[in-house]
Amino acid sequence: MAKHLGDRGRRVLVLEAGTRTLDTWPGHLDAMNTYYAALAKVPNSPYRANAAAPSPDVLDLQGLPEGGYRATGYFLQNGALPYASDYQRATGGTALHWMGLVPRMHPDDFTVRSAYGYGRDWPLGYADLEPHYRVAEHALGAAGDAAEQSDAIGLPFPPGYDYPMRRIPRSHLDHLLATRLDGTTIRETPDAPETTLRVVTTPHARNSTPNPHYDGGRGYRPAGAAGLPNYGERCVGNASCTPICPVQAKYTPLKTQATWSRRVTLVTHAVVSRVLADRNGRVLGVEYQRYDDPAAPGHTTATAEADIVVLAAHAIENARLLLVSGLANSSDQVGRNLLDHPMLLTWGLLDRPTGPFRGPGSTSGFEGFRTGPARRARAPFRIEIGNWGWSWSAGSPGSDVARLLGIPGDTGAPRPPGVFGTRLRETLGRDVGRQFSLQFALEQDAESRNRVTVDPAHRDRLGNPRPVLTYDLSDHVKRGMVAAKAVSDHLFRLLGADDRTAYAPGPFAPGWFRFDDRDYVFQGAGHAGGTHVMGDAPATSVVDPWQRCWDHPNLYAVGCGSMPSMGTANPSLTMAALALRSCEQIDRDLRELRRPAVVRLPEGQP
Amino acid sequence: MDSQQTAPQPEAADDPAECAGFVDVSVRLTGFDAFELRATGMVRAYHDTTLEQVGRPAVGRFLEDLAAAGGDPEGLTDEVSRDIARAITHLWYLGVWPPLARSTHAALGREKPNTAFVVSPEAYVEGLAWRTFHGHPPGAKPPGFGTWSDPPPAAPARPAEGPA
């Protein structure tokens, strides 16, 4: 948005709560070393903690031996289940560690309430967003195959459109699964309709081979690394997209930031603590806290005035800021409808090498469960084929090495003898080399009970109230997981795979629960949304279809927090499309504000 | 000219016999040969880490026990020596010093926390575990655009796919 508005001659002040060490190449290399040296290579592991602008971390959650969880760190959690995703407060934000997948939402995803009887409808449809999807695919640098997306998923594209870059090559595992499963039909329950299996390549915001036919034959030049010119113009298969792409072939907002016009001013180390408004609801600006060194206490408070204020701080931070400011909440919906994509992982061994831990984390998926009449009864899901073995599901290969050597997690437990030497090398190679996993991303229905609140008794170092999260999964989502597991069972059987999926409570399973007498463990996807929900009426929603707060004509809250549903698509592309669409309205608002006054003559005079 | 003054002084790291005993033991523990182990550049760091973590006397006993077992780590019967074997192997495979068994930790009277740590950023990058299945450590040694499409070495050829 800053780029878009700056390029149109608007003056933009960007206040960033975190630091900006990552937009230099030395800062990036420092993050690489931090990542290499991290014991747990979780999404936030490359990025330095900042006590002045704290971030949640997935390591803040610990499962208890009999089920349940304990939450430490930035979030306070009091829900039946934990909200299991993190984010990052620094220039570049959470998209520093995103996977970089950019599927579009399905047209059916915008009307889940009216068509399927759950969650909330959007006040917009796919057709309203479609042109902005194309602009976003250009801005993020998307690699995909529009014909395949249209044919396999039913996504409408304008005639002749294709992505800026050719689709990211499929992994060896994708090929193995396609060979064995494409065209096969399965039923998730005996009386359910048939679904035809098809491995479909996923669009990525990752540099691939440019498409010479793009943009009417003008082609596309991949955007390289921020801070190192002419570098990173192709993905080279580092296989660490999350948490960090070493060559920056994956899109991050730092690339856009590097192209900001001089009208855009970035101020870092600036934590916005309050949005200021007058009695009529007009927003005047923001109050923010400046600090020097993240490690040193002390800050000063300053104020920035603006014609229009845009909150773009992450779904949970946007909601927190509105709640702390006491604004935009006449609907009582601020902070509610907290969404994620609850993930169910399944994992096993194929009868031959899968080539694990190579290439992007997921290059293809099964798209046939994303919509259809079954949505009435259970949450839909998208199935990602996981290229990185059991790294997410079981901590491989570190856990395999420890198991083979006889090193249990509990130092007090008796140790099995272990294997060494050639036997260790061969066993590990044979076992890990055949690993694969499936990642089921479930749509979560918007529920007002899932929410962000603030508690003045719990503050961070700068005195800002920390987010309090209340989170649970609906039975609709849980029934989706039952169906996902049933589909997984079918797929593993068809593949002749050795299914090693196991769900049990324990320290690494804070997302454990029982449903219909079976155990499940879900993970967070890092896809927070819903917390300043968009709608068509001020009484029931926080922002209008332009992401403008109903209660404040010059206050925008943008990002996934505006989404009433996220379907089963990774939401960043839709978020970008929405933001680009909002720029049009902001541009109109500013033009209106700056229009010369019209002097009218009193009526009746010549 | 005094040749003694102009000749470069050999540094310890260039000495092929550096930590020869440690490399010899490591070959038996890991199943990788001396050339592969030395090529990681991690020999000195792992040798020093081991001594630092368990102390010279325990390493001495471990070497004696291993010799008594005919050089086969799987023949180690002493639980402390076996745990040291596990730790050194874990170090080589992942670049991570692991937690020792609580009993080992107590028996050695260690005055340091019994927690895992990555020896250095390079240690992670040089982990041997990835090589056992022809992979590479995530975030390092990238094999190149599109390489993930090909079967890994030693995998059977793929049958042709239908149109997809």
Image (cartoon, coloured by chain):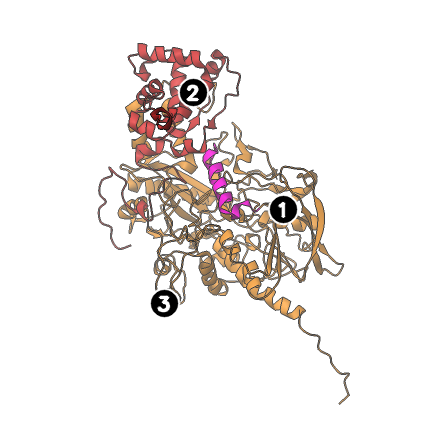
Quadrant of the frame with the N terminus of chain A: bottom right
Residue B2: where, in percent of width, then height?
A: 35, 25
Residue for point 65% across, 47% down: A271
Q: Which one is closest to the eye, mark 2 or mark 3? A: 2
Residue at disc 3, secondary structure: helix
The first of marks 3 and 1 along the sequence is 3
Task: Read off the residue under disc 2.
Answer: B50
Viewer-side residue, A250 vs B8: B8
In the figure, the red chain has which letter? B
> Can you tell which quarter of the image residue B120 is in?
top left
Q: Chain of mark 3?
A: A
Distance, label 3 to label 1, CA atoms, is 43 Å
Viewer-side residue, A180 vs B93: B93
Task: Read off the residue under disc 1.
Answer: A269
The tint chain A carries is orange
> Can you tell which quarter of the image residue A51 is in?
top right
What amino acid does circle 2 point to? Thr
Q: Which mark is residue A280?
A: none
Asked whether the residues under the numbered discs 1 and 2 touch, taking CB atoms below 8 Å apart as contact, a structural biologist would say no
What amino acid does circle 3 point to? Gly
Q: Which one is closest to the eye, mark 3 or mark 1? A: 1
Distance, label 1 to label 2, CA atoms, is 42 Å
Task: Read off the residue under disc 3.
Answer: A217
Asked whether the residues under the numbered discs 2 and 3 touch, taking CB atoms below 8 Å apart as contact, a structural biologist would say no
Instruction: Look at the image and give the residue range highlighted in magenta.
Output: A20-43
Viewer-side residue, A237 vs B26: B26
Dot 3, crowdedness within 10 Å: few (<14), some or many (≥20)?
few
Residue A583: where, in percent of width, then height?
A: 57, 63
Discs 1 and 2 lie in a common subunit? no
Residue at disc 1, secondary structure: loop
Distance, label 2 to label 3, CA atoms, is 61 Å
Residue A4 higher or lower than B49, as above or below: below
